[in-house]
Image: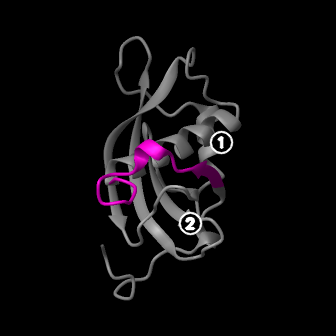
Amino acid sequence: MHDMTEEKFPSRLAFPFFQNLPTRWMDSDVYGHVNNVEYYSYMDTAVNMHLVKSGVLDTQSSEVFGVVVESGCRFFKEIVYPESIQVGVRVTKLGNSSVTYQLGLFKENIDELAALGHFVHVYVNRGTRRPVPVPHAFRSALTKLIQ
């Protein structure tokens, strides 16, 4: 785990959208904490819930959607079961056909980051799976997350 004293990391205030998620029994590994791969699941869920709640993504029928082409995560504090976490979402770059998200994972009622991740989505056509420009409705929803 990284020492947070070395660098400046975003606070809760940097994230305009939060998704609350409970940890699950199956998220834990043999070391008694949430396994690192589950953090990516929490981040993916938060990003897509923002798009669904914004009314721009229908996972079954949207002609265009984002696919992850890059992801990463820095871990600061262990998350365990049972805990509730809050995943903050913000956009750090909005390109022609891609968006870069920064995601802050916080334990409930704790202001220090448990983890800080990023996702890059490239928007593709459902049928061809080829990159396309970020649709206007998505761009509008994503612009609200730029900090």
What stretch of residues is rendered in magenta? Answer: 18-35
Residue pictured at 62% horizontal, 42% vertical: 50
The residue closer to the viewer here, 127 or 76, is 76
Quadrant into which the N terminus falls: bottom left
How far is disc 2 from disc 1 in space, using C-alphas?
29 Å
Percent x, y of residue 63? 53, 17
Residue beneath the point at 40% across and 58% down:
117
Give the residue pinned by disc 1.
Answer: 140
> Which badge, 2 or 1, comes first in the chain's sequence?
2
Asked if residue 111 lies in the magenta stretch, the reply is no
Q: Is residue 78 left or right of residue 138?
A: left
Q: Indicate whether residue 34 is drawn in magenta.
A: yes
Which quadrant of the rendered structure holds the C terminus?
A: bottom right
- Image position of 20 with respect to 111: above or below: above
Q: Position of residue 30 (x, y in %)?
A: 29, 54
55, 40: nearer the viewer:
40
SS at mark 2 in the image: strand
Q: Give the vertical position of 129 relative to 16 (above or below).
A: above
Amino acid, disc 2: Lys
Q: Residue at x 60, y 63 (%)?
A: 15
Residue annotated with mark 2: 107
The percent position of residue 20, horizontal first and vertical second, equals 64, 52
Above or below 134: residue 128: above
Binning the other alpha carbons within 10 Å of mark 2 as few (below 14), some (14 to 19) or many (20 upward) gives many
| Residue shown at 53% from the left, 76% from the top | 112
Depth check, front residue: 27 or 91: 27
Q: State the SS at label 1.
A: helix
Q: Quadrant of residue 33?
A: bottom left
Dot 1 amino acid type: Ser
